Image (cartoon, grey):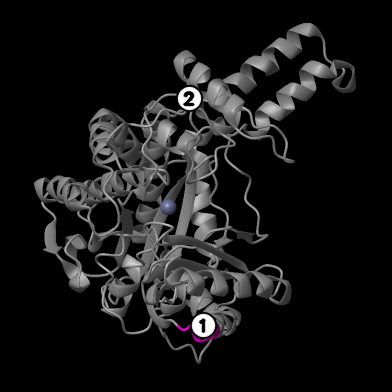
Amino acid sequence: MQEGGKLPSCLIYNAIVLSEPKLLHMNKNTIGFFALLSLCALQTNAQAVLSKDKKEVIANLEKKKDHYGDVSKQIWDFAEVGYKEVKSSAILIDELKKEGFTMEEGVAGIPTAFVATYGKGKPVISILAEYDALPGMAQEAVPEKKVISGQKAGHACGHHLFGTGSVAAAIAVKDWLKQNGNTGTIKLMGCPAEEGGSGKVYMVREGVFKDSDVVLHWHPGDRNSANPASALANISAKFRFHGVSAHAAGAPERGRSGLDGVEAMDYMVNMMREHVPQDTRIHYVITRGGEAPNVVPAFAEVYYYARHHNRDVLRGIWDRIMEAAKGAAMGTGTKLEVEIIGGTYDLLPIESLAKVMHTNLDAVGGLKYSQEEIAFAEKIISTLPASTETKPKYTDAEQVAPFSTKLESMGGSTDVGDVSWAVPTVGLATATWVPGTPAHSWQAVAAGGTEIGKKGMMVASKTLALTAIDLFKDPALIEKAKTDWQKARGADFKYNALLGERKPALDYRN
Ligand SMILES: [Zn+2]
């Protein structure tokens, strides 16, 4: 049932006994007895803290792990990018409908966004699901770089697992509500286009989370952790420079280059890096740069992201990037058009909720690899670039990171940020990837398509379900979370989406 787990303190005691018998004045027989006792404790310790109904929830999820593994693999195969997740959302909707959830599809003006609801009355606990893939990341489920020919995208952020694992958890909670005759509502929020599309922002703006008391989420990763974490606020836009085409050698004086506009902007923004707070992140790709060197490009486009943990600081940095773009257009005689694509808030962590999540993750435990998976993992680890950190070990996936109140900051951003300022929100990460694997890498796509990904996903499903059950059973936990959240958010908080009033950028991946 349980797939390994963090070393309980009894095993540490056991290790002391075996290594330093003199310290404890024991003979070999006594040592053997304690060793046996400790090993027994290892088997039962984590699960022993669980109530009977929670153990049943875990057992039921475990029974359906192959089914959910298949669902996730199908979404991995579909590899649909943001707002194009037609088949991926349909398969999850189908799972939820079969289980008696009421469906609301096409919410917030987004065809692939949905809300699934089961139960009645308060509290309302919502679980987030994502299912979009990343362009240019097609990769087979093998431990060497091997692109799937003809496929344009891949699940390099594990959202096929995110979506399926969350749906599995919502169904498990529904079964628990039903079997125990509890009141309360479980919702599964189908959230498209997390990767740059800011799907949840439109859902927040539309009030989709209005009646939720607590929101739960998770994310695939290379370790198991439920510590309070933050993320960077983010604004993104496409800057389009319109010029005039002409023969690049025959009549260059008659042309105005859109690419000059892009390059002038990039140059200025790159100089700006020296004069922004150190923890700022700015990155871009030139998405259109002209077609042929002998034609002055009449059109060019650059796609920018800027991030900072403080969204007010970010707004200031963004204003300066806008000025650089305007200056570039002016200097190159081109016309500038800007389309804000995305904008997400930083993540607001709630320590009291993180503790509840951590306790459940600890009880569920990490995952244990089979011999075949060990071989896969070792090959993957050998492909990871050397880093200054200690070399990862595949056994790290068996551990659960100890709880820490020191706020961890994800290097990335997420539209869960906006949700966390609308409702108290808590999340976890599980080791769906081989330890040491960064997100958005071919190694992440590869492991996500194997049993390793599926095992990590089930750790998340179980932890989410158990955490929801705690919240249903103990209203005081929700009250405490709300008080902490109100305090952290501040009395004068007013929500203003960083992407403004724009409509969902349904074609941002075109
Ligand atoms: Zn992601």
Residue 295 in view here: yes
Q: Residue at x 14, y 55 (%)?
A: 101
Q: Circle 2 is placed at which residue position?
A: 144
The boundaries of the magenta stretch are 327-333
Q: Circle 1 is placed at which residue position?
A: 322
Does 68 appear above or below 237? above
Residue 299, by quadrant, is: bottom left
Does 163 appear above or below 40? below
Q: Residue at x 51, y 87 (%)?
A: 330
Residue 482, by quadrant, is: bottom left
Q: Describe residue 25's horizontal placement relative to residue 253 as left or right.
A: right
| Mark 1 surroundings within 10 Å by alpha-carbon count, few (fewer than 14), some (14 through 19), many (20 or more) | some
Q: Describe residue 344's horizontal placement relative to residue 411 as left or right.
A: left
Depth check: give the residue in front, 50 or 242. 242
**Magenta segment: does it hold 330?**
yes
Q: CA distance from mark 2 to mark 1?
A: 41 Å
* Residue 390 in picture, x, y percent from top left: 73, 35
Does 388 appear above or below 300? above
Q: Residue furthest front?
A: 250
Depth check: give the residue in front, 332 or 482. 332
